[in-house]
Image (cartoon, rainbow, N blue to C red):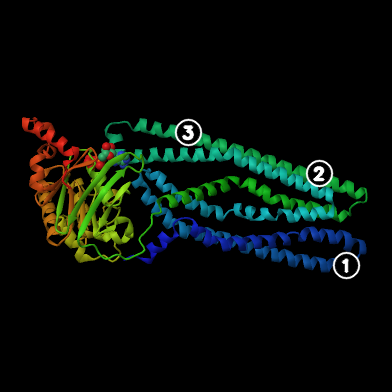
Amino acid sequence: MASSNTKALSEHRGDAMLKAEFKGIGIFLFWISGIINVLALTGSFYMLQIYDRALTSGSVQTLVALSMLAIGLYLSQGVFDIIRSQILVRIGGRLDRILAPIAHRVSVDMPRFGFSTSEALERGRDVDTLRGFMGSQGPMALFDLPWVPIYILFVYLLHPVLGAVTLGGAIVLTLLTVLTELRSRKLSSTAQQANVLRNNIADSNARNADILKAMGFAGRAVARFTAANQEHVQLQTKASDIIGTFSALSRVLRMLLQSALLGIGAYLTIKGQMSAGSIIAVSVASSRALAPIDLAIGNWKGVVAARQAFKRLRETMVALGGVSGPLDLPAPKHSVKVEKITVSAPATGRVLLSEVSFELKAGQALGIIGPSGGGKTTLIRALTGIWPTLRGGVRLDDADLNQWDEDVIGQYVGYLPQEVALLDGSVIENISRLDPQRDGKAIVAAAMAAGIHEMIVRLPEGYDTQLGPMGTALSAGQRQRVGLARALYKDPFLVIMDEPNAFLDAEGEQALNVAISRIRARGGIAIVVAHRPNVLAEVDLVAVIQNGKLTAFGPKDQVIATHRPTIVPNPVNTPAPAAATAARTEYRTIQNGSATA
Ligand SMILES: Nc1ncnc2c1ncn2[C@@H]1O[C@H](COP(=O)(O)OP(=O)(O)O)[C@@H](O)[C@H]1O
Ligand SMILES: [Mg+2]
């Protein structure tokens, strides 16, 4: 099941692969640019030869021969130019093919670590930016830049003074490029951040459309977006102003320089230090020398955008690129061990759960209870590897979760999140977890186990019904049951359910209990977080999580007897009896170290 695709992806993570992939092509492009630039001297040489040889000797034959030669050289320059631009466009495409899946995978990973959706989707746009840049004039300028000295040398050989002036001009223009970079770098990245902020607001407004309508504050939401949008546009305008100004400055400077070279050349010719042909040759060569610098300044916005996109992609890839297990581990059959795990929220770093340990064996089911905000979902996130543990680890048959290939371990784990979101797709795609080989039997079996088979076949298109974005075509309870079917698909060894009965009716709860007892009967392990005690009917073990600690763990009857208050269904309606106070004192005793683990 460890598709070679996934393997390739994990190997490609990080930037080593980018370097290896493109080093060879980079070197090739460098040399081909060298050839193009040497060939581009053709014009200058031609002028030189015509004025200083053909004209002075008056030989038409020489003129024709020179012209033929020049035409040949021009044509070959054109061919190399075409090759180079085609290579660049293909590199863009290739970068896209390699980066797009990785970038999307990173985008998929990011929300788990507290990044916003729009920030995550930014990585996909980064790939577009890079591909677009590769097809633009920008990279040509960058590859031509190292060859500028050829032209300066050529001019220098015609006359040292003109060489010095050209060199001076090139230096000033380069300084202008550096200045553009320094002045615009910070602005561009601030504008980028403002862009993310603006998209976050747009995103959250769209997701809260119902609330905005029902309580009539869409106007204020739009105003908040507009403010963020203006901020972004202002920063962008400033950055464009700077780049535009420097670009105009450099153009003027270049024209000045060109005329200066002509003037000085004329002076030198009058003084008999140079031939007339040299003036034109210098003019052609110097304009060619400064063109890439000019082009670089003109395309600087693209260069900056591409570089930032590449940097962001690299950083996130390195940061999120986990080590995947290279081995195909055998399917887990025996146990789940939680060893002293401490978990913090990746976004804030705040420790939410500390030093939790317990062990479950095949055939057991654990109910996790405890007050809201106590850390139950956090424990589930660590158990499923959604969040990494700060210390300690979770082991399936003694192998740490980190040792498994993500896509391999997925088939042994069923997970029903607290807030069920479904994929934009059909019932089949959702239950089968996008399995391309839709196993009809397993899908129907999972639906039956979740008690939704009848409901599904009554849908307009049965199992092929499209559920819409986030599964909005279904009610919350129906979504939760489809989520349950997805968790039970193909009988995974470990099934983890976070408050699975939140939206369930009595019939749904019945299906859930049957599912738990079936998991136990087939030698699996079930872990279920429960707010209401109804779902604890089929579990044999109970754990209490409160204030980020495991305060009790043991056989159901025993734990429940001492922890009645935490599992009272609706504490608001229940007057606290004297017994509850006594039980609360008991918690404290347990919290102070006597938790059985
Ligand atoms: N994504 C998150 N980032 C930061 N803190 C979080 C996040 N999710 C939950 N928390 C915090 O962790 C604590 C435990 O939350 P949770 O595990 O969801 O509780 P429970 O599931 O027991 O109701 C809460 O104080 C909550 O504010
Ligand atoms: Mg929770």
Label number found at residue 260: 2
Question: Residue at 73% of width from left, 47% of height from top?
Answer: 170
Q: Disc 3 versus disc 2: distance between alpha carbons?
A: 45 Å
Residue 184 visible in the displayed image? yes
Residue extending farthest to the front is 593
Q: Is there CB contact under 8 Å for labels 2 and 1?
A: no
Badge 2 amino acid: Ala
User: What crowding class fits label 1: few (fewer than 14 Cα within 10 Å), some (14-19), or many (20 or more)?
Assistant: few
- Decide which of tag 2 and tag 1 comes sooner along the chain: 1
- Give the image quarter of residue 330: bottom left
Q: Is residue 38 left or right of residue 325?
A: right
Q: Disc 2 versus disc 1: distance between alpha carbons?
A: 33 Å
Q: Disc 1 versus disc 3: distance between alpha carbons?
A: 67 Å
Q: Is residue 43 above or below residue 115?
A: below
Badge 1 amino acid: Val
Q: Secondary structure at mark 3?
A: helix
Badge 3 amino acid: Gln
Q: Secondary structure at mark 2?
A: helix
Q: Of circles 2 and 1, which is in front?
A: 2
- Decide which of tag 1 and tag 3 comes sooner along the chain: 1
Residue 472 visible in the displayed image? no
The yes-or-no answer for disc 1 within 8 Å of ligand 1 is no
Label number found at residue 160: none
Label number found at residue 60: 1
Closer-to-camera residue (114/431): 114
Q: Is residue 203 left or right of residue 554?
A: right
x and y percent of residue 115 in the render?
38, 43
Label number found at residue 230: 3
Question: Residue at 30% of width from left, 62% of height from top?
Answer: 408
Question: Residue at 45% of width from left, 35% of height from top?
Answer: 229
x and y percent of residue 322 in the render?
38, 54
